[in-house]
DNA sequence: CTCACTACTGTACATTTCTACAGTATAGAA
DNA sequence: TTCTATACTGTAGAAATGTACAGTAGTGAG
């Protein structure tokens, strides 16, 4: 989307507010009234500019035929946290296409405000009580401290492990004896810390062990 | 809201779909086209009926001036859920003095709406990924099905276990070999099911094993 | 300088849209 | 039975709305 001018952004914002408040996009006349213009064409010009810049779509002939296309990250006011499902290879972890849903979470729930939720895959953190299908609440941090459970990325793979660093040697420790620790020499390999775990959410009826919960008994 | 006729419900549904799909409420003419009417008044009559029954609001003079009022499942109606800490002996589980806090939870998070949160104590459900300090989201139900994880009460003690019933014999199974199953003969002992687990919340920085998380490694 | 874009005023007109009025037919309640 | 509500057809007019055309001014790029 081309950058909007200040005035165009104001118009777009007004359109958004109208849709949210009134349930209807505005007419040209309503825009004129709201901004104190004295000519319908002023409003129409702005709409055409916004349409040309792909911020809105104009439906020819239809009254109030304005469709807002530009979406900023969190759906308005909704202080939501995105749920990241499968992370696409090569894409940033918060790429729009990997966001499955948005959740509103009570801030009191977590010690630190999470930036996103990640759906856990695999059993490697089983003994830390982190099971497949769980939603891990993750706070974006660039560096981790020893002992923290982190979301790390090596190449295209995103993994959840306990972080341990001694000098330039990082070990990503699973919490399951069936899995082997991952060793990374920072001098040779790149390791991106996507964030650290600050909470966990598990949904659905517990207890039916559909994912094959491990019972030691 | 007065009950809608079948036809009125169809019209209302069409209006909803138009708003969702097109971003705009329909005009009378569009309703006429969608339903194959041959007169504008047919659409207008339906709108007036819907407005009279409080299903929609009509904005006089405004094109597409239809506002849908009837809301079925309140989309993100976050109701508060109490957190139950230590349950007082003899008191009902939701007694005011045992409620530590209230949390607003996104309804989408859980398959069934939880009625309260219970702070987990002890390691007896460790291998089901339920650890001390976790908040168990519980739906109040009087009866449980085999395999479900339930909150049960025997006398003054509240416990979280997997439920299994064969005839009059109930077994409350821990998920930890260090703990023994509890056997109850319903003919002799009373067992109160306080609810079933529908989700889990874990807060605080994970990984520092402050609660002595069990590592099999 | 010219050119393209922004940001407006002002006028005009065709279409879209709402709304009122006059009917027809059916069904259930009082 | 009468009354009221539903569910439509058909017509007409007024108001709301979109859209085209003709301008004025300012700004920044080339």
Image: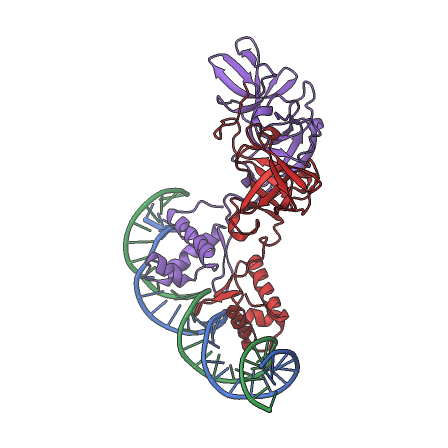
Chain colours: A red, B purple, C green, D blue
Left/right placement of residue A22 relative to residue A198 reads: left
Along the line of sight, the residue nearer the viewer: A204 or A188: A188
Question: From the viewer's perspective, is residue A94 above or below residue A33?
Answer: above
Q: Please identify the residue farthest to the top as the structure is shown.
A: B188
Count of marks placed on residues? 0
Q: Residue C20, located in which quarter of the rendered image?
A: bottom left
The front one of A216 and B88 is A216
Q: Residue at x 55, y 12 (%)?
A: B183
Residue B62 at x, y = what percent? Answer: 50, 65
> Could one spot residue B49 in this view of the protein?
no
Left/right of residue A109 with respect to residue A213 in the rendered view: right
Question: Is any atom of residue B56 visible in this view?
Answer: yes
| Quarter of the view holding residue A146 | top right
> Which image quadrant for residue C14?
bottom left
B169 w.r.t. B1: above or below: above
- Image spot of residue B92 (x, y percent): 65, 23
| Of the pair A117 and A107, the residue shown nearer to us | A117
Residue A169, position in %: x, y? Answer: 67, 40
- Please name whichever residue, B92 or A161, is drawn nearer the observer in this view of the structure: A161
Residue B78 location (% of width, % of height) = 60, 42
């Amino acid at each position: 989307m081309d950058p909007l001018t200040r005035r165009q952004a104001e118009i777009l914002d007004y359109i958004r507010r109208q849709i949210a408040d009134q349930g209807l996009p505005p007419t040209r006349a309503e825009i004129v009234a709201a901004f104190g213009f004295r000519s319908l064409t002023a409003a129409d010009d702005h709409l055409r500019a916004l349409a040309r810049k792909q911020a809105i779509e104009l439906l020819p002939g239809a009254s109030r035929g304005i469709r807002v296309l530009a979406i900023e990250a969190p759906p308005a006011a909704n202080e939501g946290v995105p749920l990241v499902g499968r992370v696409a290879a090569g894409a940033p972890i918060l790429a729009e296409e990997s966001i499955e849903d948005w959740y509103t979470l009570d801030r009191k729930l977590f010690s630190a405000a999470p930036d996103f939720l990640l759906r856990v895959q695999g059993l490697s953190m089983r003994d830390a009580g982190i099971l497949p299908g769980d939603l891990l609440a993750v706070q974006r941090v660039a560096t981790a401290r020893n002992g923290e459970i982190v979301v790390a990325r090596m190449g295209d793979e995103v993994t959840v492990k306990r972080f341990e660093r001694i000098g330039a040697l990082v070990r990503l420790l699973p919490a399951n004896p069936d899995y082997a620790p991952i060793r990374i020499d920072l001098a040779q390999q790149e390791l991106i810390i996507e964030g650290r775990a600050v909470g966990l959410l598990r949904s659905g009826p517990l207890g039916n062990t559909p994912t094959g919960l491990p019972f030691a008994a």
